[in-house]
Amino acid sequence: MKRAGTLRQVSDLSDFSRGHWLRELLCRGEEPCHVQPSPDGQHLLVLQKSGPPPMPRVVAFQRHSIAGTDLERNWQPPQPALVGLLFLQSPVVLDSWVLAMVWEHGRTEVWHFVVAVGWQLLQTLELCQGARARIVSVCSQGASLVWCEERPPLGAHSDMSKCAFRFCVCARALEVGEQGVRLGTVRMVLHNSPEYQVLASPQHIFLVPAAAGFATTSKFLLIWHPETAKLTITAPSAGFIHSKVLHSSSESDFRKLLLGSVGLLSGFTPLDIHTSAVSNSGGLLLVSTKGAVNMVEPDGTQRHIFDLEVGSLARGSPVRLKTFGSILACVLAGVLYLVDQNNGRLIEKEVLSMKEVHFLESPGEEDSIQLLTQAGIYSFCFSKPEDSSRPEPCLVEMVFEEACRYYQRRSLSSSKLTVEKLKKGGAFQAPVALAAILQHSLHQKQKPAQGLQDTYAKLLSTMSLELQSYMSLELLKTCVVCAPESEVESYCKELVEQEVSRILHSDMDKDNLAYLNSVFTSFPKAAWKATRSCLQLQQNGEGLLVARATPEVWKKVLGGPQLDDVGQNGMVPLFELICASFLRFKPKWLPSFVELTQQYISMSWAYSSKEGPEGRVPLYKRALGVLARKNKHSEGDNEMELELLLCSKRPKAVLQALHLLIRLKRWQRVVEVAEKFSKLSPLLNKEIFTTLLAEFAQHRELDPYLDRLWPLCPAELTASDILTVVLQHLPHSQEDPVPFSSEGNQLTVGLLKPLLQRVAQRPSVHEMYLDALQSPTFPPPTPPREHKVPSKAVADDVPQPPIARTSSPSALVQDDSV
């Protein structure tokens, strides 16, 4: 873990050429100036767009007083202003670069610095093709320039709604060779668009809407992928992401691009962007007016990093952002924030005495952050802890932070619980005990219980296995970080298996589910093997899939946050994650896995329970949803859909599978499914037979299977019912019917005759009860009755005659009438 050091001065600007002038430029001016360091850190370009006299200018300063011609340019409004200072790599000489100065009207000056000679102008080029074009934003990516330019309409009184979309985004290669500088052809990225600020990462271009743009177009960002010619529309806060590959220039029209999403985008709130910058990892850093710092990844997703301690940011207040490795450095209102990008933890907060602060490049010094101020250059260095055997304080802090979240969720008080209150107060002993055990035992190999209270020592003996498991997991993580590339994969497999097993034996909340999603995405094969191991999935001797997982693990698989609870941004429940792994690595096992889960549900939850998984969406439908979301569809998807429908054994699913087989004209399988599932229930038997009888009436494909189809006829269907179904589904012919058709595909009485004979030979309902209705005498004689009521004593002594029983319903009716 890195530990922040102190801020120390490394230069007073005297090692720069004209250092006193550099200090003066940093001190003067009502508005902050723009400082652009060179890639090698030996040059500083200071751009002052406005301020006191004489005029706006750009000045280059060389470090270590390198001799040579200085570079200084100024301009006087209304002359075109300078909009960009860009350093481009030169392919002629390794690790060399050139400076491109881009002016508002498109003129581009390419400069090169030669030691002992100074700055030399290589060439002046025209970047834009139109004379009336005006560049509003420009950036560089490798050896290419990307810019947003305004193309004013020709008419003086044009429609203002059309004038709003008068900008376009273009790209052009700038090649520096031995023969000079040459511009490539113009590549149109976007046209008829609003104004955008273009920011370049190593692989992508971010298009951020300008502050003065329309409210409708300031609700989303655009991300251009140059290699694949793909444009991504994203509204990060709303979780909306849509990508489209631009095959031709006609598809790059802004209004056509949004045509399918304008209704959805209109309901979003406008983006809250105060400052934007690109991180060294390729993401887009956004600071809102409320001080929230977020990272938008190149795929369009967004994650929150940190909240700056400000009420609200004014539009003109500067915020400096720069990333150094995994550390995000931010300067706001004279305060330096150092934040870990990976977990959002504040590493250091330093109050600076300087007003104007700029970040500089630190070539070869990833653990050093350099700041340029009017007093000189300061460095903020990180150092590792001296004693690595000491317990990590971060772990103890995590215990109290997790305890704060746990107790806050269960508290009825409105006051916020903090780590300080938790440490000082005596009401919560669990985190105090756990922190003491961690501090005394994790790094003490010989006597782990030394120095602990008796109660803590007893608790340590109880949780010793858990601590041992944790230590082995931390050791494995260290091996993954330090291992050579050839051994990383084997370590990752073991690490993923332990992590998946750990989460399946803990509470499945949203945080754990999000972590599992990232594990399954980053290590799909290792996560699949870990899932098989945790569920103990294997085939028995008969080739059937069996699982020997504990009921607790099954509840984690089927319970936890569901689709309605997990939200957007691509996170899915654990059951869907496992189904996706089955589809990728063992698709033949997926129907059997769904059947196993249904068997477990029938044993663990009541059939009508709304708390169980089947109380929301049936499992086979959730598995079908995973199948539908596959990136690449194959011919086996229809067979997989059939198996998932049939394994559920639900009547609607079976009928849906039957209709799918009929649509695919797989008649052999149709009859097999009908024979198998007609035995489940009489109602399903009737639906299946009626469906097949309707198909039989329309074509002759089922004729070879009639000897297997007719025995499925339900007992309650009469000949009249059968003829009604057949007549309703006979195909309609446009020609007049003839007695003998030459096509040979008409339904004849001869084909129906075996079915009608079978129905006619069945005993009718009347015949089934005929024996019961027959009696020697009808109605039976009335039994004799005694009108005298004997006394109670006599009645108790005299045995009573048995009750007369008869099998004739008529006798029962006669007896009731009397």
Image (cartoon, grey):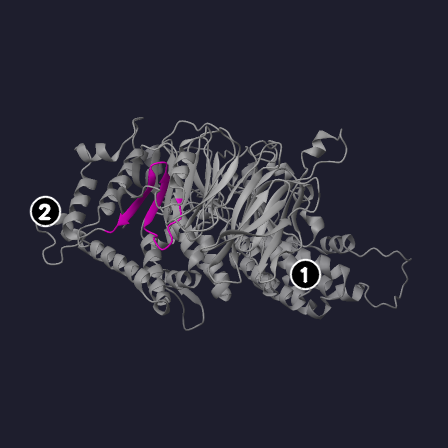
Three-letter code for the amino acid on which mark 1 is drawn = Ile
N-terminal label among 2 and 1: 2
Question: What residue lies at 73% left-to-right and 36% top-to-bottom?
Answer: 153
| Residue 611: quadrant of the picture | top left
**670 and 7: which is toward the camera:** 7
Measured as percent of width and height from the top left, residue 574 is found at 43, 52
Three-letter code for the amino acid on which mark 2 is drawn = Leu
| Residue 596: quadrant of the picture | bottom left
Q: In the rendered image, which residue does mark 1 sit on?
A: 662
Q: Which residues are magenta?
A: 360-384
Rounded to the nearest angstrom, the CA distance separating label 2 from label 1 is 73 Å
Measured as percent of width and height from the top left, residue 597 is found at 44, 56
Secondary structure of the residue carrying tag 1 is helix
**65 and 432: which is toward the camera:** 65
Measured as percent of width and height from the top left, residue 780 is found at 58, 46
Is 756 one of the magenta-colored residues? no
**518 and 150: which is toward the camera:** 150
Please state if 417 lies on the left or on the right of 798 as rendered: left
Q: Is residue 761 above or below residue 214?
A: below
Q: Main secondary structure of the magenta part?
A: strand
| Residue 741: quadrant of the picture | bottom right
Q: In the rendered image, which residue does mark 2 sit on?
A: 452
Secondary structure of the residue carrying tag 2 is loop
